[in-house]
Amino acid sequence: MNFDCHYCDKELEETGGLLFSPPDADDIVKKHHICVDCYVTISAGAIVIIYNSLEQENKELKEHIKALDFKLEGEKKVNQLVKEKNERLEKLLESHIKSSNEEKERLHENIEVYAGENKELREVIKDLHVKAVSMLKKIAGLFLITLIFVAGVSVYQSGVIKEMTKDKDKTSEIYKKEIKALNDKKCKPKKKVKKSETKTAKKVTYSGRASWYGSGTRTATGEAFNPNGHTMATMNRSLFGKRAKVTNVANGKSVVVKINDTGNFGKNNTAGIKPRVADLSKGAFRKIATLSTGVISVRVKILT
């Protein structure tokens, strides 16, 4: 019985035909007859396909192995880094432990030193306490002595005051007797009058040169000096407290002033010029002349 080749339709003998299922057949289960040429051709193509598949798998395997090697290398580097980091941490920990031990030793030494200083400080405080107690005792003794002394002085003063009171009473009695005797005799004590006062009382008006001054804090009478006030300084102290009318001879202007001060008045000049008879305060001098004039001729009249 003859058969045809499934691929090339070549007539086949029964004994020369092969029963074969090609890999690209639509129906894998179905068996076909195939000639030797088609079989060889199909087998070679299958081998090429298988080879290419194996090459692809080999390439993928190599890439996978390369990736594994790269990963392994990375893991080695990571392990190396971890190892180095662990070594550094171990060294750092050892250094920290060593420094902690040294710090601990220094702390113990400082504690011992502080303990010694604290002991010395306690001894010093104890000595100061003893000295303070002793000082307080001395102060208390001095205070007691002072109280006793003050009490004695008070008693002495009270006795002295009593004696002085008695003497004062005796003196007042004597004065009363003398005053009574004077009244009986109708005799009054005469007041001594200085020559200068007598001369002044007679001379109520005089003339001469006058100037002004504006410095100073107190007058000769003890009053506060006011440079803008109406006051006058004179050589005659018996006129203190009196009022006077000063007239500028050149223009006839006058001002009423209070006599409350004294001064030099140019008595020490060597040019033979007579001393000034008065020095007016700046405010009073401005009423009768300009300050730039300096010295003017005046007529002074004592009012009261």
Image: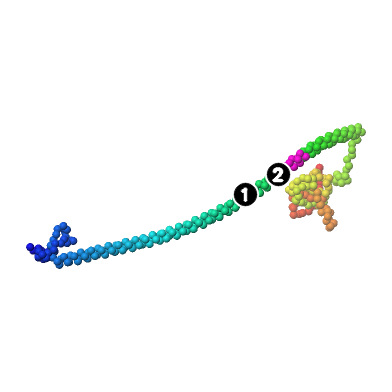
Dot 1 and dot 2 residues touching (CB under 8 Å): no
Residue 168 image label: none
Query: Where is mark 2, residue-wise?
Result: 130
Q: Nearer the viewer, residue 116 or 239?
A: 116
Vertical order, 257 against 35 (above or below): above
Q: Residue at x 78, y 52 (%)?
A: 211
For the residues labelled 1 and 2, the Cα–Cα distance comes to: 23 Å
Q: Is residue 136 magenta?
A: yes
Q: Residue at x 56, y 53 (%)?
A: 104
Colouring: rainbow
- Which residue is outermost to the front? 15
Magenta region: 133-145
Q: Residue at x 37, y 61 (%)?
A: 72
Amino acid carrying mark 1 in the image: Ala
Question: Where in the figure is residue 286, as x and y percent of width and height?
Answer: 74, 50
Vertical order, 178 against 282 (above or below): above
In-image side of 225 versus 17 (left or right)? right
Query: Where is mark 1, residue-wise?
Result: 115
Q: Nearer the viewer, residue 163 or 18?
A: 18
Amino acid carrying mark 2 in the image: Val
Q: Earlier in the sequence, mark 1 or mark 2?
A: 1
| Helix, strand or loop for disc 1 | helix
How packed mark 1 is, by other alpha carbons closer than 10 Å (few <14, some 14-19, many 20 or more), is: few
Question: Where in the figure is residue 239, as x and y percent of width and height?
Answer: 82, 45
Q: Nearer the viewer, residue 269 or 184?
A: 184
- The answer to whether residue 251 shows anywhere in this view is no
Question: Where in the figure is residue 121, as x and y percent of width and height?
Answer: 65, 48
Question: Where in the figure is residue 135, as x and y percent of width and height?
Answer: 73, 43
Which SS type dominates the magenta stretch? helix
Vertical order, 133 against 176 (above or below): below
Q: Give the foreground label among 1 and 2.
A: 1
